[in-house]
Amino acid sequence: MQSKSQRGDLQAKDLEIERRGLLAKMKAFKKSRTRIQQLEEEVMELTAKKAELEEKIRELEAERNGLEKEIEELEEKLTINELEAKLAELQTQIRELGEKKRQLEEKIRLPEAAAATEQL
């Protein structure tokens, strides 16, 4: 049979063991809580970074779309300029050909006119 003092010592040892177990659990809990807070901060930072990147992507896509539209307009203007140049060139060629035709017809008429006057 154990004496009161031995029982008290055993109870004290049991309490000490229980206290150390609780302290270890508390320490582990605090460590877990700290890690959770760190993870929450990281998630918030990543969420902010994601939103920032998405906004930047939207801006760049809008800029790209604008540039594509401007390029399309410039290509149309270039096509119009090329067509206008072609038109002017053709008009000049037609004027020159018309003048050449008129000169040739004039040359043909001169001998005919001279021959007609000789026959008179």
Image (cartoon, rainbow, N blue to C red):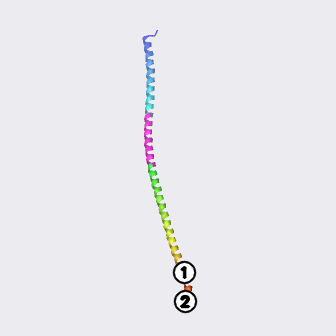
Cα gap from disc 2 to disc 1, whole angstroms: 18 Å
Q: Position of residue 61 (x, y in %)?
A: 46, 51
The secondary element bearing badge 2 is classed as helix
Q: Main secondary structure of the magenta part?
A: helix
- Point out the frontmost of discs 2 and 1: 2
Image-based side of 51 in relation to 99, left or right = left
Q: Position of residue 120 (x, y in %)?
A: 55, 90
At x 50% / y 69%, what residue is drawn? Answer: 87
User: Residue reaching furthest front?
Assistant: 120
Q: Nearer the viewer, residue 19 or 29?
A: 29
Q: Nearer the viewer, residue 78 or 43?
A: 78
* Residue under pointer 2: 117
Report the disc number at residue 105: 1
User: On the image, which quarter does residue 119 sit in?
Assistant: bottom right
Q: Tell me how many marks there are.
A: 2
Does the magenta segment cover residue 9? no
Q: Mark 1 or mark 2, which is nearer the start of the sequence?
A: 1
Q: Position of residue 9 (x, y in %)?
A: 44, 15
The crowding category of the residue bearing disc 2, from other C-alpha atoms within 10 Å (few below 14, some 14 to 19, many at least 20), is few
Does the magenta segment cover residue 56? yes
Report the disc number at residue 78: none
**Which amino acid does the dot numbered 1 rest on?**
Glu
At x 56% / y 85%, what residue is drawn? Answer: 112
**Which amino acid does the dot numbered 2 rest on?**
Thr
Q: Are marks 2 and 1 in contact (CB under 8 Å)?
A: no
Residue range corresponding to the magenta coloring: 36-57
Image-based side of 111 in relation to 45, left or right = right
Looking at the image, is 59 positioned above or below residue 3? Answer: below
The secondary element bearing badge 1 is classed as helix
